[in-house]
Amino acid sequence: MSKAYLVLSNGDIYEGTAVGAFHDSVGELVFTTGVVGYLETLTDPCYCGQIVVQTFPLIGNYGVIEEDVTGKPSVKGYVVGELCDNPSNFRSQYDINKYLVDNNICGICGVDTRQITRTIREQGVMNAMICSEVPSDLSAIKAFKIENAVKAVASKETCTFKSGKENALKVTVINCGDINGLAPALTSRGCDVTVVPFDTSAEDILAAGPDGIIISNGPGDPTENTGIIAQAGKLIGKKPVLGISLGHQILALAMGGRAEKLTYGHRGSNQPVTDLRANRTYVTAQNHGYAVVADSLVGTANQTMINANDGSCEALEYPGLRCFSVQFIPEACSDSRDGEGVFEKFIGMMGGDFNA
């Protein structure tokens, strides 16, 4: 096994063992707190441009199950404490190292992921490099920037998904990169779904006559998506609109609000969200590095949920506009009761009966 290094832009160096298709790679270093779901992590387009640290110490113990792979990997690198060589699961087809090699993902194992995570929590997200030799100059690491993330991962194809229900409600989903769980979540609730590219004009979307519109989750800095923000502004008030994660941020920007980069983001399937109206906390799935500044929308939107850890904005409603948004990913919640009511509320807003 070859030696490898994880070099942080602050100068910290971690020595470990190379795994995967080893090559030098620079990216934004983030951590995810999920205990399971490493295949979903590796194939989540919201990790575009990022080197992902798994806080759970053992990764790969149930192997690779191709049925659980949700798309093409977008990660720039993978950091784990221990990589399992001999997975044990009746569904396992091969080990995760082979998956990393086959998909040209470089990685490093045998490093102190707990200390790396603490560094990110205390100092904030920073750039890093996985490499075979420690560079004498960190300028290339420090200069790295994720740009055009939505364009890099979002499909440019239009596709449809049918529910099989007579007189089904028609939902148009604007694809910002992560639609894997959206279509089945909607079709299972009796909606026919049309997924359109992120650069589709508001005029074309409205001309198709949808009953409602969803702006999906996706990667990167929301402020760089000026085209999507402009089109979203034309849709609000015309049809019921739901924004999810990046879509939540895009709607806020379209309505004159602001978004800011979080110190270390919310990534994992165990993010606590408090409903301010029901005084109830849910455990949600999230993957984002930016948050809406709720105070920037005073008089325009009502904040209905906050993150129980840091108080950041988790949900907004726009009175009189049939428009609302959530920062978490309702279709990815491990328990359907967590994030309860998001799709049901949207269907009701379109005039449907989700129990039908």
Image (cartoon, helix red, strand yellow):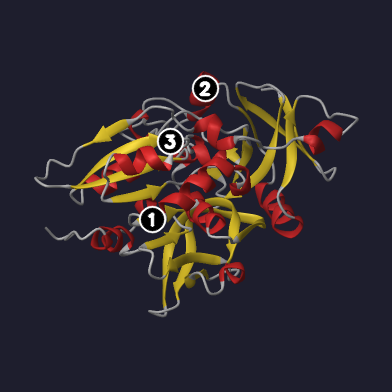
Report the Cα–Cα distance between label 3 and label 2: 30 Å
Which label lies toward us, 3 or 2? 3
The residue shown at (52%, 52%) is: 250
Q: Circle 3 — which element?
A: loop
Residue 302 location, x and y as percent?
Answer: 48, 73
The residue shown at (53%, 71%) is: 308
- Residue designated by label 3: 200
Which label lies toward us, 2 or 1? 1
Direction from residue 84 to residue 238 in the image, left or right: left
Comparing 321 with 16, the one in front is: 321
Q: Circle 1 — which element?
A: strand
- Amino acid type shown at disc 2: Asn
The residue shown at (26%, 50%) is: 211
| First in sequence: mark 3 vs mark 2 | 2
| First in sequence: mark 2 vs mark 1 | 2
Report the Cα–Cα distance between label 3 and label 1: 17 Å
Which label lies toward us, 3 or 1? 3
- Amino acid type shown at disc 3: Thr
Quadrant of the image containing the N terminus = top right
Report the Cα–Cα distance between label 2 and label 1: 34 Å
For residue 242, the mark is 1
- Amino acid type shown at disc 1: Leu
For residue 55, the mark is none
Residue 113 location, x and y as percent?
Answer: 66, 47
Quadrant of the image containing the C terminus = bottom left
Pointer 1 local density, CA inside 10 Å: few below 14, some 14–19, many at least 20: many
| First in sequence: mark 3 vs mark 1 | 3
Above or below, 261 relative to 28: below
- Residue designated by label 2: 103
Direction from residue 185 to residue 132 in the image, left or right: right
